[in-house]
Amino acid sequence: MAALEKISSFFGISDSSAEDEYAPEATSASSQLNEVEVPTEIADHLNNKGRNNVVSIKSGSVPQSKIVLYEPRVYSDAKEVAQNLLSNKAVIINFSRMDDDSARRIVDFITGTVYALNGEIQRVGDKIFLATPPKFETDGKITELVEKKDKLS
């Protein structure tokens, strides 16, 4: 019967007279023989009772993906495009305001950056490219405009 009282006092469901009987000051040889082992799951639960187990909804949310639009005018703008790719942002680059030689140099630079990141770069229009970091997925292709441009060149 003493073991049952000890368990009930451990879980806090005993009356005050039983608690007084098994107070730490009143330990005797007979009470030490009747000790009961508590499973570790229950002990862990009781030890964590005071902790806050509420989890914020925002803490598990996935960060938003971003697409940055660029119209470079000089070669030094390629560094900003590469920085956005390194920050896991997709970049759409419109070269309509640049001469072809400078645009080709930037495409080469961005292609190297994309290759180093295991990303992708693709042409989506006349003088328009899409560069994506590794975890972006693009579906489909815009081939009509690209094929027309290639035939005219």
Image (spheres, rainbow, N blue to C red):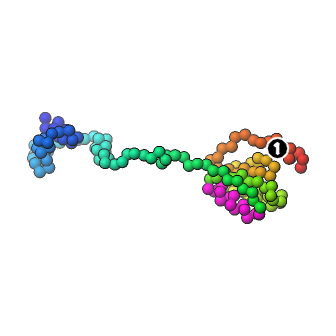
Q: Position of residue 124 (x, y in %)?
A: 76, 47
Q: Residue furthest right?
A: 152
Q: Residue at x 56, y 49 (%)?
A: 63
Q: Residue at x 62, y 53 (%)?
A: 88
**Image quadrant in which the N terminus is located:** top left
Q: Which residue is mark 1?
A: 145
Residue 3 in the magenta stretch? The answer is no
Q: Residue at x 77, y 42 (%)?
A: 142
**Visible residue check, residue 102:** yes
Q: Amino acid at mark 1?
A: Leu
Residue 84 in the magenta stretch? The answer is yes
Highlighted magenta segment, given as a residue range: 74-87
Numbered disc 1: secondary structure:
helix
Query: Which SS type dominates the magenta stretch?
Result: helix
Q: Position of residue 22 (x, y in %)?
A: 13, 44
Q: Residue at x 61, y 56 (%)?
A: 87
- Where is 48 relative to 109, above or below? above
